Image (cartoon, rainbow, N blue to C red):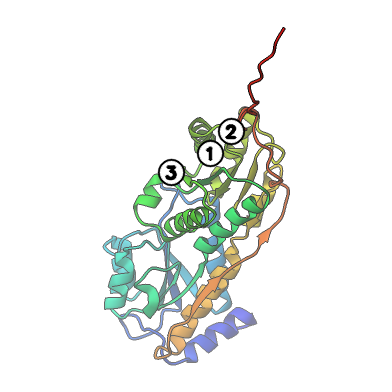
Amino acid sequence: MGGEGGAARDAATAVSGEEPDASGKATHTLGLLYPPAGRDRDYTSMQLSFIGGVAEAATAYGYDLLLAPSSTYDDPSVRRMVGERRVDGVIVMEVRREDDRIERLTEADFPFVAIGRNHRTERAGWVDLDFAGLAAGCVRHLADLGHRRIAFVNRSEQLFNSGYGFARLGHEGYTGAMEELDLAPHAYLCGDDLLSGEDVVERILRDDPATTSLVTLNEAALEGVYRGLTRHGRSVPRDFSVVGVAASPWAEQVNPPLTAAEIPAKEMTRIAVDLMVERLRSPGSPPRHVLLKPLITLRASTGPCRPTPGSEPENEFPDFDIDF
């Protein structure tokens, strides 16, 4: 074999500790358990970036990638992948608070790592973003600019109710920061599409017309959020500030570009594959946990708070007795 891929494959083959298939041989294939999060059970643009990143990082080590769009362990594709040893190890994504994939892989002692985490992933390697800390940092950024009415646009109701970790952690970070600042939290669930983004702005301004800013974890609805604000006569950032957690391609394609904490998909997938290969090469070593805390990149979507007309209290004047 020639080239870097061939060298990596030779190295992987020579390493002890790889999981064999049913015939006792390593498959040189990694599994990716990644359920689609789109409204129509399709993969979002962000998810496709993660799939591409895992595939690229796996190839560098000489591994192929087998994708299973599965949210539960009992999905036939997962049972074939693990039960028939079609892969040497598994990377689990879209981790929920209670996730039977994590539990069953742990019980089976099958090698896996996670992009995301819950209370049961401590026995495995994982890489994750500090979604709670990032959401809190976004709130503090807006508060430093004088904003006091700050809404939160999360992911869809279906994802939140199913216990997706990033949606729950983001909500906790937002509400915690608002409470620390003695501000009233107003959190909203929003589908991952343009029309849902427009709708959530409608709901926010109907509930509190004096809202001057929002924090979002939903990059797929971002364009709709901007459209909704424009339709309601709110100019970003003159009248309304928007900040969020989003990968730079999505943050930079809206106008004005979004002030945001980066979702470093390529770095996260590279780390996950590194952890997976470490697990296969040294199965007895303690698992590593990597929590990324990217800084907020200032762009053009946030500015000083300008209260909306009619939201400020009227001046009270003393009564005068005037004699004519």
Residue type at the position of mark 2:
Gly
Q: Mark 2 points at which residue?
A: 228
User: Can residue 64 be seen at all in this image of the molecule?
Assistant: yes
First reached walking from the N terminus: tag 1 or tag 3: 3
Q: In which quarter of the image is the C terminus?
A: top right
Answer yes or no: do the residues labelled 1 and 2 have beta carbons within 8 Å? Answer: yes
How far is disc 3 from disc 2 in space, using C-alphas?
A: 20 Å
Answer yes or no: do the residues labelled 1 and 3 have beta carbons within 8 Å? Answer: no
Residue 70: x and y, percent? 36, 59
First reached walking from the N terminus: tag 3 or tag 2: 3
Determine the secondary structure under disc 1.
helix
Q: Is residue 109 above or below residue 36?
A: below
At 69% from the left edge and 13% from the top edge, which residue is drawn?
Answer: 322
Residue 109: x and y, percent? 31, 81
In the visual, does 94 lie left or right of 11?
A: left
Residue type at the position of mark 1:
Gly
10 Å crowding of disc 2: few (<14), some (14-19), many (20+): many
At 55% from the left edge and 75% from the top edge, which residue is drawn?
Answer: 271
Residue 197 — which label? 1
Q: In this view, does 190 lie above or below 95?
A: above
First reached walking from the N terminus: tag 1 or tag 2: 1
Residue 230: x and y, percent? 64, 31
Determine the secondary structure under disc 3.
loop
Determine the secondary structure under disc 2.
helix
At 54% from the left edge and 63% from the top edge, which residue is drawn?
Answer: 133
Residue 39 — which label? 3
